[in-house]
Image (cartoon, grey):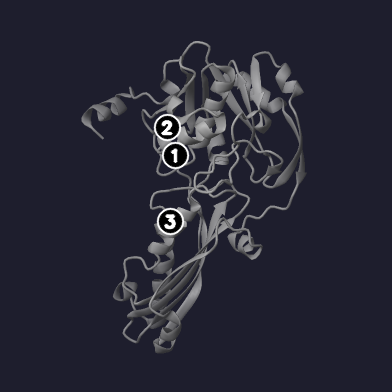
Amino acid sequence: MNVQETRLHLRGESRFIDDQPLPENLLYGAVFVSPTAHGRLNGLNLKEAEKIPGVETIITAAAIPGENQIGSIFPDEPLLADQKLHYQGQTIALVIAQSPEIASAGVRAIQAEIEELEPVFDPRRAAAKDLLICPPRTFSSGDVEKTWQDCSLIVEGRVDSGGQEHLYLETQGSLALPTDNGGLKIISATQNPTSVQRLTARVTGLSMHRIEVEVHRLGGAFGGKEDQATAWAVMAGLAAVTLKKPVKLVLRRGEDMRYTGKRHPYSSDYRLGLNEQGRMLAYEVTFYQNAGAAADLSSSILERTLFHAAGSYFIPNVKATGISCRTNLPPNTAFRGFGAPQAMFVMEAAIFKAAVAMGKDPSEIQ
């Protein structure tokens, strides 16, 4: 951060999405989301919401001019839910109105007919039901199976690590403005402006070169705006293209925490073999990654977990398997460390258990 930027922050003069000068005819967005973790959307009643003075339009999946798809690695994430509901907080409809208060009133007036389905929240249960984001992957070095017989001590166990909220200072938000050439300018607090540009083009049907994405500041991100800032920018862009007016969509803190993904929770099984001196000879680990309802960046994050499976230690024989499990939670996403902390936590837990069994201090094994 340069000195000028530091001074702006210290004085409270830095402008974020919510501080941008308001253009004329600005409209505001609010989202109607799934109240259930898993279900079938059988009907949507918008009549009462549409009657509210100041509600300009309500956008559903049926009104999308392009493709209803914002999946960046795998095309498995609709912008607006249609028929199937996969997590609580999944966006079903976008209400555009003349003020944030009117938009919120429009959201409250929408009625949905939903058939509840059984949700899955545990990654091991998802794996047992073959609910996977992608096929399992295994990284290996040496031969763990042959090495177990050479170990004087073998410890094994299970380690669970929970999710973590990014809690960036600026919540997810975007301001979209139609341009005089029939294009679109999007101001977004995103770590990935190219993704915003590409996926807005996919959803709206505009060519990429007609979409400009501007990032002033992130207001914090920590990975939470690498992929997940995209949906809100695309929604604002879609509304601006539909109405040919500027549209602002900023989540309140509670909405942001409920609707967006976190650091991936993992449930892992390990087996660690050592010789009499405490030197680690073999390590086998299986990671069950709780990806949530869509891929987001889960496959790439799981790869990073596998690369860091042995932590900072040289173990000649290693077998690490990663399973990305699809559950009925908001899609989990990038977070500082990008899958490495989960792997290191399992490795350190295994070392601690071995140290206790050998009557050593963990630092001797480390």
Mark 3 or mark 2: which comes first in sequence?
A: 2
- Say which residue label 2 marks: 189
**Would you call the spot at circle 2 few (<14 residues within 10 Å), some (14-19), or many (20 or more)?**
many
Q: Amino acid at mark 3?
A: Gly
Question: Residue at the location (49% across, 10% down)?
Answer: 24
Q: Position of residue 136 (x, y in %)?
A: 53, 64
Q: Position of residue 63 (x, y in %)?
A: 66, 28
Mark 2 or mark 1: which comes first in sequence?
A: 2
Does 339 appear above or below 361?
above
Question: Is 264 positioned to the left or the right of 142 in the image?
Answer: right
- Say which residue label 1 marks: 225
Q: Amino acid at mark 1?
A: Lys
Q: Secondary structure at mark 3?
A: loop
**Residue 339 tag number:** 3
Q: Amino acid at mark 2?
A: Ala
Contact? badges 1 and 3 (CB < 8 Å): no
Question: Residue at the location (63% across, 19% down)?
Answer: 102
Q: Position of residue 329 (x, y in %)?
A: 60, 49
Q: Position of residue 19 (x, y in %)?
A: 42, 21
**Would you call the spot at circle 1 few (<14 residues within 10 Å), some (14-19), or many (20 or more)?**
many
Q: Which of the two residues, 148 or 241, is positioned nearer the viewer here?
A: 241
Does 209 appear above or below 77?
above
Question: Is 280 positioned to the left or the right of 46 in the image?
Answer: left
Mark 1 or mark 3: which comes first in sequence?
A: 1
Contact? badges 2 and 1 (CB < 8 Å): yes
Q: Which of the two residues, 236 or 63, is positioned nearer the viewer here?
A: 63
Q: Which of the two residues, 351 or 49, is positioned nearer the viewer here?
A: 49
The quarter of the picture where residue 361 lies is bottom left
